[in-house]
Amino acid sequence: MPINTLESHLFDNHSVNTYPFDVLKNATIGIDVEHYISRLLSFKKELNYDAISGVPLTLLNYIDTDLKMFQELNIRPLFVFPGLKSTSQYEKLLNGKELNSSEIYHRKVWDDRTYSRDGGYSFREPWSSIPIRPLYGDLITFFIENNIDYLVAPYSAVVQLHYLESKQMVDVVYSSTDYLLLNPTQKFILGFEFQNREFKSLDKTNILSRLNLSFEQLKNISFALGNEFQPERLPGFLSASFPSLHDYVNNGGSIINSLLQDPASLEKFQRGLALLKYVPVLKEDGSVGPLNSELFQVSHSSSSKPPNIAQSANSSSQSTPSSVNTPLYPKDQDLQIPNDLHDVIGQRLSNELYFYISLGLINFELLESIIYDHYLERLPLDAQVTQLYEKITIGDDSIELKGKVLNVLTSFLNRYYQVKRLQLTAVYQPVRELTLNQRIQPTIYSKIRSIIVKTNQANGTVFTLDGFFQNFSSKFVTDSVITDYPNDSQKISQPIDIVSTGLLRALTILGFVDYSFALTKWGELLVSPLFQQSKHPKELFLLLVLFKLGKITERDLVEPSDSKVTSDERKSITLISKISGLLKLKTRPINYNSKVSRSVLNFRSTISKINTIVSETLNSSLIALFLSATELESSVRLNDTDYWRQIVKQIPFRTSVPNTLLGVATLTFLTTYINAKEEGPEKGTEAVEKANAFIEQTFSPVSESPKAQVVEAFEFFKEVGSVFKLLGDSKLVADKSLLQRFESSQKLIDQIQ
């Protein structure tokens, strides 16, 4: 987050410079992805984004347009993502186990919309930025496909960019006002204005001169108001703004003296300074260690006792710039690292894990759960926690599965991570706190490590989920099991083999293959012709995992509903529209501001959580495979970045599930059709024509062929219905009313077609 209320103050004081874009010709620009996305999609754009979720409709088009401008001027962008959260950032996310402002806002907007149909609602919280973590997989895939360089920082993208600039790996940085807190920093880009072919830039020397502030005073105000390193307003400054504190300091006031009256606020202030001073970065040699600018470098004798956070922060706030000849990045072993630094940054991981982080290969939530002892669940975007959502997130089967996934992930980490007590905290109402048991013996990894898939495909053959499931069979599983320590001929290195091995191991953890490597009843569904011939294997598989973990009933799928009418047809409409929402509506890049559905969004939130569960299971299997390395050819670790990025690109379930628009379009079509039949004497064909006309009128601005895509959604529902019948035949679904609901829904579609 940028320094609170500073940017507008800089514009008011004419401290922002404008330059023609051409001066950046042939430059390498390091781009802070979080800041960049917040500029592309301000809170006044994509007003319905939080009501449809997925990838913002205009985002990739905006990025593609910017990349063409970069290409025109021979500019090389390097996109840097933020990584793990610091302790203070994680505590803010936990929010004292209370609903945060975004969740309160979403609940209020949805409730207001339920009781008033006037429209005009914005589902974007004012002044909020779109969270980018759910988009990492989509953005990284986009960058890899377009041969654009990217990097995921160990922690702060801002500090990582500062390191890259200092090492001349980038010529200039595009970041938020947080970049002013780093020293030495002079000029950086605040914003691009491509239409005018110019950019906005900040010069710290000019800013300090115009504001009549020292660097220390600027920093003190920033940490009182909140920034990336101290992400909340301190209690004594809740109503303050940068202009008011600027005047206060210019008139002789002291932020430090104010903080001395409040020990808790002073401690947060000190922790923020310590994070800024010691936050680790990924370095040239692949190691991860603290970045220390000359301003914050404090000399200690080698025999002195390491300081604590308070001592280190105090010395920073009182220090003066060192000689220009002082090394900017002294060796880590020459630094006196505070002995309680883990209270600020979190417990340290191995360099190898930070390497996988840098690629975007590993789930942050898994790592943060073992760092901070909590796996955190918050309200979904629809602000409803249904019985089904509870079963998926905090049900007994889900909690057991989460323990297995963490057991696999920690198999090759320090024993401390293997035995520490973890819990899942669900910030619902009421808050739920459940114990996660990752201390499983023998380890899950010891049961699945004999699975090695060697496809013997030609070099460069790409993994596809369709191809994997088409080849999946009992023989495929047994042929992929070795009975002894792998010899050189059995070891793997091709991305297709690595991803296939990880996925087959994940299927075992998920219960589609048992630990004797035979297909379970659920696994047998994967070899059925209905599944293997499907055009949508990913979506069908996610539904199977949902049915398996959720122990689905009819009520789970027809509630909640947007309609208060509970007729048989209305229930079928709800079911069909929710299932249809798994597919993606082919859209134009526009700011969508039309129909939304809370019930379809609720089901999307559930499917998104299932996608996360599958992704985490696969992710832990792959990370354990890499950390073990016994099943990999020795050359794997020597491969270049392009090799690793191909692995990242081919991993399934990394990207987000589609937005709700096809589900909403299907709901709109079916509702119009039923209303036409109920309100007038129209025959069936006339009601269909009326629904077709309305769907074209409503959704043609966002999609070229909404009617054809609704038909495709109907065909997908038929596939799901056929697979669901197999579930019933296999006695894997106990609720007969749900089976009947699928049958009656199928009849409704048959009437229309």
Image (cartoon, rainbow, N blue to C red):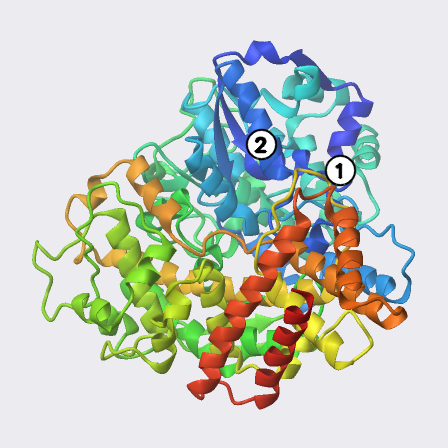
Which disc, if any, is residue 114?
A: none
> What amino acid type is highlighted by mark number 1?
Ser
**Image label count:** 2
**Residue 184 on image: x %, y %:** 53, 24
> What amino acid type is highlighted by mark number 2?
Ile
| Sequence order check, earlier mark of 2 and 1 | 2
**Rendered-image quadrant of the C terminus:** bottom right
Which disc, if any, is residue 254?
A: 1
Give me the residue at 49% from left, 59% from top: 365
Instruction: Please name which of the two marks, 2 or 1, marks the residue nearer to the observer.
Output: 2
Q: Secondary structure at mark 1?
A: loop
The quarter of the picture where residue 3 lies is top right
Image vertical order of residue 236 relative to residue 277, above or below: below
Q: Name the residue that disc number 2 marks.
A: 63
Q: Residues within 10 Å of mark 2 (few under 14, many from 20)?
A: some
Q: Nearer the viewer, residue 350 or 55?
A: 55
The quarter of the picture where residue 625 lies is bottom left
With 725 as the anchor, is 126 left or right in this view? right
Measure how far apart labels 2 and 1 are at the Cα level. 43 Å
**Residue 136 on image: x %, y %:** 51, 46
**Residue 684 on image: x %, y %:** 76, 67
